[in-house]
């Protein structure tokens, strides 16, 4: 390599480091891979947040910034007046879709198109984010139009390449229907055979086996055109309880956690995961105060943000889980989640007024200084950056009569 080419390379490297360090563009590492046939490469259509290295966006108005940190839910197959209020007036930028919100692939495509139209009407700073949980096995929301996935336990037995290919095919179907973020893969190690919630949702109990499978799943989601979410941080596989029913506890020490549960999350972060989902369990070895992990600054900020150096979106598990609602009402839980360092809060309630009260509680805490405006602006920027990187396919342009992507697992055996 000649001196001139070395100099050019050094300049490019310096510019890349400057861009990566810019606080206004905090986000996970973006992995640019060729898009599969029929799938839009999000890197080619994402709108950049900054037009030059020296620019810094003006702070968002408080209502708009807080709204970007919230994910709303609604009941039934029709967009409710309450959800319209949350998007148009509260400026909520994310909607969590469940199976009762649509009946088939065509209705899901219409729903995502209508939600994006509402986002544009609301003047959101990036496309509205539609998230739908399609991890495989027991957790599948779409019954047609998307290639079904087996459980992680079954799929992982076929090796990383099979995981990647199957997940990419399923993600392509989600992308085709207007879904941008999948709360998957499960990165938990099943270290407690008596656990009540993970089971076959995990790739296994051996960190050396699980880590590359988690990375492969992240790559598969990206290649299918969908953002990836690692869950359930700091790991539910060592606990015996189910946070959907009651608050579980895990007796792992920090050293044990580092050698086990942390490994899957580290691998997913290294693979470029866009988000990490925190969950509700008590791990005294990680936070001696006994604060549930999702609400623990020591876990969310101390471990995930600072120790594992995750720079993407930290998203909560649904705040409507029984293990949370027995201890916190929704406004208190939302405030506690934000104070811990979560960027995006899954309000997980069909009651729009209740969700509005939670949003108002955060605004009040910002107003009195309990939550800093800098934190809110940084969280909003992370969420907006994710949405700009993974804009929705326009469902109105799709031919839903065409056969959806499929993947033959029988051909993937190693």
Image (tube, grey):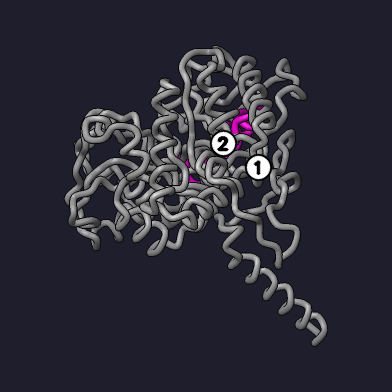
Instruction: Give the percent coordinates (x, y) of residue 130.
Output: 57, 32
Name the residue located 35 percent from the left edge and 59 percent from the top edge.
303
Which x, y percent locates residue 230?
Answer: 44, 45
Give the number of callouts. Answer: 2
Q: Is residue 162 found left or right of 200 in the rendered image?
A: right
Q: Mark 1 sits on what residue?
A: 125
Classify mark 2: helix, strand or loop. Answer: loop
Q: Main secondary structure of the magenta part?
A: helix
Q: Is residue 178 magenta?
A: yes
Badge 2: few (under 14), some or many (20 or more) residues near its Cα, within 10 Å?
many
In the rendered image, residue 54 lying in the magenta stretch gets the answer: no
Which mark is drawn over residue 158? Answer: none
Q: Hey, which quadrant is residue 127 in on the image?
A: top right
Direction from residue 232 to residue 61 in the image, left or right: right
Element marked by disc 1? loop
Depth check, front residue: 413 or 327: 327
Identify which residue, 345 or 365, lies in the foreground.
Answer: 365
Tell me the residue that label 2 is attached to.
93
Q: Are marks 2 and 1 in contact (CB under 8 Å)?
A: yes
Kindly identify the residue that appears in the image at 49 percent across and 47 percent down.
Answer: 275
Return the residue nearer the eye: 227 or 287.
287
At which x and y percent is residue 81? 54, 17
Q: In the displayed orientation, state which residue is furthest to the front.
A: 368
Q: Which residues are magenta?
A: 157-179
How far across and how far down the image is residue 393, in percent? 70, 32
């Amino acid at each position: 390599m000649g001196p001139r080419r070395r100099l050019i390379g050094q300049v490019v490297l310096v510019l890349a480091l400057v861009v990566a360090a810019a606080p206004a563009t905090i986000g996970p590492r973006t992995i640019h891979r060729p898009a599969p046939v029929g799938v839009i490469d999000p890197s080619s259509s994402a709108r950049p947040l900054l037009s030059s290295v020296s620019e810094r966006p003006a702070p968002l108005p408080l209502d708009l910034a807080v709204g970007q940190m919230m994910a709303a839910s609604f009941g039934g197959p029709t967009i409710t007046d309450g959800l319209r209020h949350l998007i148009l007036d509260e400026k909520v930028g994310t909607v969590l879709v469940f199976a009762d919100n649509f009946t088939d692939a065509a209705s899901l495509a219409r729903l995502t198109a209508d939600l994006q139209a509402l986002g544009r009407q609301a003047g959101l700073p990036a496309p509205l984010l539609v998230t739908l949980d399609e991890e495989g096995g027991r957790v599948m929301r779409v019954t047609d139009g998307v290639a079904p996935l087996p459980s992680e336990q079954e799929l992982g037995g076929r090796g990383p390449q099979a995981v990647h290919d199957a997940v990419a095919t399923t993600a392509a179907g989600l992308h085709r229907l207007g879904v941008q973020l999948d709360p998957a893969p499960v990165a938990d190690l099943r270290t407690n055979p008596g656990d009540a919630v993970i089971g076959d949702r995990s790739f296994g109990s051996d960190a050396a086996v699980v880590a590359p499978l988690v990375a492969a799943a992240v790559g598969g989601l990206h290649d299918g055109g969908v953002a990836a979410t690692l869950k359930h941080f700091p790991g539910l596989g060592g606990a015996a309880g189910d946070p959907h029913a009651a608050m579980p506890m895990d007796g792992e020490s920090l050293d044990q956690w580092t050698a086990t549960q942390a490994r899957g999350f580290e691998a997913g972060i290294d693979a470029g995961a866009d988000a990490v989902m925190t969950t509700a369990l008590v791990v005294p070895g990680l936070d001696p105060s006994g604060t549930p992990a999702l609400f623990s600054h020591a876990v969310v900020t101390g471990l995930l943000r600072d120790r594992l150096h995750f720079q993407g979106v930290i998203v909560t598990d649904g705040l409507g889980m029984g293990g949370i609602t027995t201890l916190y009402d929704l406004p208190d839980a939302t405030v506690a989640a934000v104070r811990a360092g979560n960027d995006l809060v899954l309000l997980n309630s069909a009651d729009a007024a209740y969700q509005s009260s939670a949003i108002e509680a955060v605004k009040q805490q910002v107003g009195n200084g309990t939550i800093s405006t800098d934190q809110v602006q940084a969280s909003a920027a992370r969420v907006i950056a994710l949405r700009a990187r993974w804009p929705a396919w326009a469902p109105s342009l799709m031919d839903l009569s065409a056969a959806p992507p499929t993947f033959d697992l029988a051909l993937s055996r190693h």
